[in-house]
Structures are given as C-alpha cells and as structure tokens.
Image (cartoon, coloured by chain):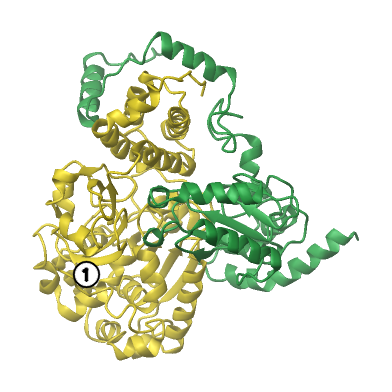
Amino acid sequence: MSDAERDFAAVAAQVEPEARRLMARYPAGRERSALLPILHEFQNVEGWVSPEAMALCAQWLGEPLSVVESTASFYTLFHRRPVGRYMLQPCRNLSCSINGAGAIMARFRKQLGIGHLQTTDDGLFSYEEAECLAACDRAPCMQVNLQFVYDLTEEKVDAMLAAMRAGTYDVAPLPQNAKPGKDWSVAQETGRKSAGARGVSDPNDPGGFGDASGLSMTRRLAERPYPIEVRPTKERLVADGAARLAAPPSLPSEH
Amino acid sequence: MPVVKVLTDGIGEFDLRDIAVYRERGGYVQLRRALTELTPADVADITSKSGLRGRGGAGFPTGRKWSFLPNNGRPRYMVCNCDEAEPGTFKDHMLLEETPHQVLEGILLGTYAIGSHHAFIYIRGEFERGYHIFMQALADARAAGFVGEKLFGTGYSVEVTVQRGAGAYICGEETALLNSLEGRRGEPRLKPPFPAVKGLYGEPTVVNNVETLAFLPHLLARGAEWFAKVGPERSPGYKIVSVSGHVKAPGNYEVPLGTPLRELLALAGGPRDGRRIVAIQPGGGSSACLFEEHLDLGYDFDTMAANGTMLGSGAVVFFDDSTDFVVAAQALVRFYAHESCGQCTPCREGGHWLEVTLERILNGGGLDSDIDMLVAVSHQMTGINLCPLGDSIEPFLASVVKRFESQFRSYVRSPQREAIPV
C-alpha cells in the first residue's frame, strides 16, 4: 500500500460515520440527497475533493461515478484539485465594485503575483474573484476560507497577507494533503461553457487577443453593423406567433 | 421616519441565538398555540388573509401558493430557501445569523400549515457561519421539544433537515434548488409541473423564502388584519430592504411597503457628501434601473412593476454621479454569465459573449455597433429559457445603456481606439 492510499484510508475512516448519519436524514431510497453534504465533509478533511473521495461517495450512494463527478463539478465551492492553505475570495459584484473592489483586487493580484483562480507557488494562497457574498452593507467584502472580512482597504489586504505568512492570522488555514498546482479550477483548463470560447478573454489577461472566430466576427460587424430591431418581448412573441399562425410549418407527409 | 421592528426586533440588542432569550421575548409561543389550538387550515387562512407575498423575488401570494398543493395523500415537503445570492441582497444572511430561532419557528409553522412532516432548509454554501448557528439553534429547539415526535402532547411530528449548498446562484431558483437538494446538478426543471404538484422527490412541495416564513409567528401573534392594513392594499406588510451602494449608512432597513425610495435613501444616511443620486436599482441584480426622477415612488411590488422594474428580493442599490455605468454593467453581466447553469443556449452563449463584448468596450477596443448589440442580444435572450436567469441581464443593461449612452459611447470613441477581437 502506497503512502497516498494509506492516507486516504484514514480519511475515509474519518468521514464514513458522518456520511452514514447524513444519508439516514433523508426518506428511504433518497440517500443521493446526502451527496453535497458528504462532499463537504471530505473537503473539510482533505482540503479538496479528491478522485478517491468521489469514487467512495459513488460506492456509498450506489450511484455511478459519473453522477458524482458531474454533480461535484457543478458547484464552485468544491475544489477538485488541491488548493492553498488560504482561499482568498474578494467580491467583484455590483455593490462592491462601485465601492472600490477594483483596487482591492488589483492589490491582491500585485501582492500575490497570481491571478483569478490561481495558487501561489508556495501553496499558501489560492485566489478567486467571487460573486456577490451577501454582505453589501460592508463593501468591499471578501471571504477567507469562507469567513467574512468586511470594509476592505489596501492596508487591510497587506496586513492580512502578512499575518497569514507569519502564521498569526485568526482564521484557521485549510487542510492540505497534496501539493497544489498553479491552476485549481478544472473549468479554467477545459475552457468556458460557451461554444468556440476556449482561450477567449482570459480573466488574467483582459483585452487579450482571442481566437480567429472572434476576429472574423469583428470584421463582419465593422463592415455590416448589427441590424437592430428591438421590440418589447410580449409584442415580439405575439408577432412571431401571428406569423407562425399565418404560415403554419408544414408537417412531414406520411409514408 | 417609518422605522419598524418586526423581524428585526431585538437584533443588535439581544443575543437572539440563545433559545432562552428568544423564548423570553415570546418565541415559540405561537408554535405551541398553533399546534395545540389551531388547525393547519387556520394557519393557512391567517396567512392568506394577511396578503403576505413571497419575499424571495417573485412576490407570489404565500397563502395562494400553499393552496395549490393537491390533496392526493402523498407526503408533502416544506423547503425554506436560504440560498440568498441575488446581487445586493443580504437580509436572509442577517436573519439566519441573528435570529435563527425566528426562522426555525417560521419554518415549523409553515410546515404545519401545509400538512407536512418534513421540512428542509437549503442554506447557501458560503454562509458557513450561519449554517453552524442554525444547526445549534435546531439542536436547542429539539432539546426543548419544538422539533421531533408528538410535539406538545399532540399527534403532530416534524423533522427538519439542514442542507448546505456549494456555490451556485442558480440554486436560488426553486426547481434548481430541489435538484440540488436531491444531490443533482443545480439545473432548473421545466415548469409545469410546478413544485406544488411535483417537487422534491416528485412529491408536492412548497418552497418559501426565509423572510416570508419568518413573518408567520408574527402573523399568528398579531393577526392577519395587523399586517394587511399596512402599506398598499395589494402588497401589504413590512419588508426588510437591503440598501447598499453609494450611501453613507448601507444596511438592512425594515419598512412598510409603499415607503418612498427617497425615505429609504434618507434612512441609509443619504448620498455621500457632494454627490447626487442618479440611478437606483430597486430589486436586486435582475431589475431595471430607476432614476432620480423616480425617487418619490413608493417601494412596493405593484408600483415597481408599473414603472417597468420590480421589487424582487428587496435589494436597493443607489448609484451617485461618480458611477461608471459601463463598469457596473460589466460587473452584473459577468455575474450572470458566470452563474448560467449552461442548460439553455441563449443564456449560456448570450451571457458569455455579452461579458466579452463589454470587456472589449472597457479595454478601449469596442465598436459603436457593440452598444446596440448589447441591447439587442440581451433582448433576444429574454423569455426563451427554462428559468428567469437568462432574462435577468436585459433589464439593468438596457436601462443604463438607454440612460447613460454617452458613457458607453465615450469608451468606443476614444481616439486611440483599435478594434480588439473578442
């Protein structure tokens, strides 16, 4: 048995009783509802959701591994690669961005030398620009390992990072049982959700050049500006519906 | 000033997380009364008569929502939606962390009213602290005999299950929330069937917002009439409004519905010194902007709807004359692009390309036609998706492009402009 396997056996032994308890909370036959809570348990112990953890979840719940992986990959709080000891997530949404979040994010990027969805070489910090954290009254705000930090200033950022480096920061670091790579978001590696959008608009290189399809689209737009016809939705749908009624689509003939 | 304290009563003065403090202030009295003296129909009746409308965003009358449950003898579920993530909203976050027992009592009353024996609360994954606070509250309430088997010597038993989300705005949409609660990807379902007919595990289910349910103990204590006579006739009652943006004292303010926006602004300390409010987003990230000439409008469901926007989740963001609306628009569009679940093509593709186009405009590489394209694409995304997320970009984007077009134009007409491919 290798070291990694032995480690995971200990993790599994630690999580299993809690997982069984979680599964019993739901109506009989609905144990799959415990999937998210069990993944949270694994992440609390390991600092991330490892492939072994997902495989074990699948076994406990009696579901295919693909089901567990597809579910885990949907949620941004589940890290399917190892991350740093401090997960730094400043908010970039509306109320924060009109109250100076831009300067805060720039400060983090400069002080850490990394960008969105990246981890520092020493494995201490992971950085993600997060969406609205529901603390807009204390903007700009952020979470450190899911603990809120409010009313951020650049000085506060510097002091926070210094305390974390010195090991005196009052939020407990995340567990870390494997060395993180530079990128921890799998979505970032596989491209965006959009068709043909791979490598387009890298969040760490805004305004950077993308693929050729974007270039040809721009040329087309420059030559032939987009034909604009904006009607209110309801009116548009009524008009579309009327057109459809006037000329019903022909049904395929029977053979 | 119309400051009222109903749901927010005692917050900041007492430690309402302590069950003893909560009970001293009248907590769980209404639960005992409902279970021992009232039928579920009585509780539902009071809720209907109060005119309480859902506080999560859609504003649907709560009593009517409950009445859609079919009498088919199947198990029923009550689900409390605490997946608060609408940009600008932070009221449920406060209620969960400051008054967990009030939330729990509301859930128990709602569960009783719809004749269910199993309630769920789905707490946003980021609210880790709130989750632990609520777990403690639930354990205390269970120990005190408010949750469990045969409560207060009646035959009524109820179980409450707390579920944590894991980072997905879309799980605030009720059918996506149900999928997530079932251990699936949080993708919205096709409606109909609505959750009242086929919800959690395919059984009749009611999904209510935290604030909606938290009103129930107060409705029972003070009667439907007390609530119904406050504010406009068709959207009565009180509302916690999350005020943020360019104001001196952002925060949660509880007011009667119908309070003018100008008074909300004054409650929140007014605009910053030397600044003037030029725009207001009255109902969370998905609502269209109002402008300074609208400051005297009453803040309620129907007035907002009549003015082309919505009350939504009750998040009011004030913008003063220092705002760069191109940056603001980008922050919101990026959010919707990021949070699209990817099921429906218009939302997945439209959101992404709008984000990239706005980025290009901000970086000085935009074209004049981009600005019209923003409006056209966001409009074409509307009304053709499974859930309202894809419809949420147009209201804000179109309203600020129309009003502050010169700001957008100034980006694309800078002299050093050279088109950057997206």
| Towards the viewer: B239 or A51 | B239
Name the residue type under label 1. Ala
Shown colour of chain B: yellow
Mark 1 Cα shell of 10 Å, populated few (<14), some (14-19), many (≥20): many
Residue B335 image position (x, y, % from top left)? 44, 43
Give residue B85's quadrant in the image: bottom left
Residue at the disc numbered 1: B44
- The one nearer the camera, A206 or B323, is B323
User: Which chain contains the residue that carries disc 1?
Assistant: B
Q: Residue at x 11, y 63 (%)?
A: B231
Q: Residue at x 35, y 81 (%)?
A: B156
The image shows residue A171, relative to residue B62, as above or below, that is: below
Chain A shown in which color? Answer: green
* Residue B343 image position (x, y, % from top left): 47, 38
Closer to us: B337 or B166: B337
Question: Is residue B402 found left or right of B120 in the rendered image?
Answer: left
Q: Position of residue B411 (x, y in %)?
A: 39, 27
- Report how many numbered discs are placed on residues in the image: 1
For residue B32, side relative to residue A199 (left or right):
left
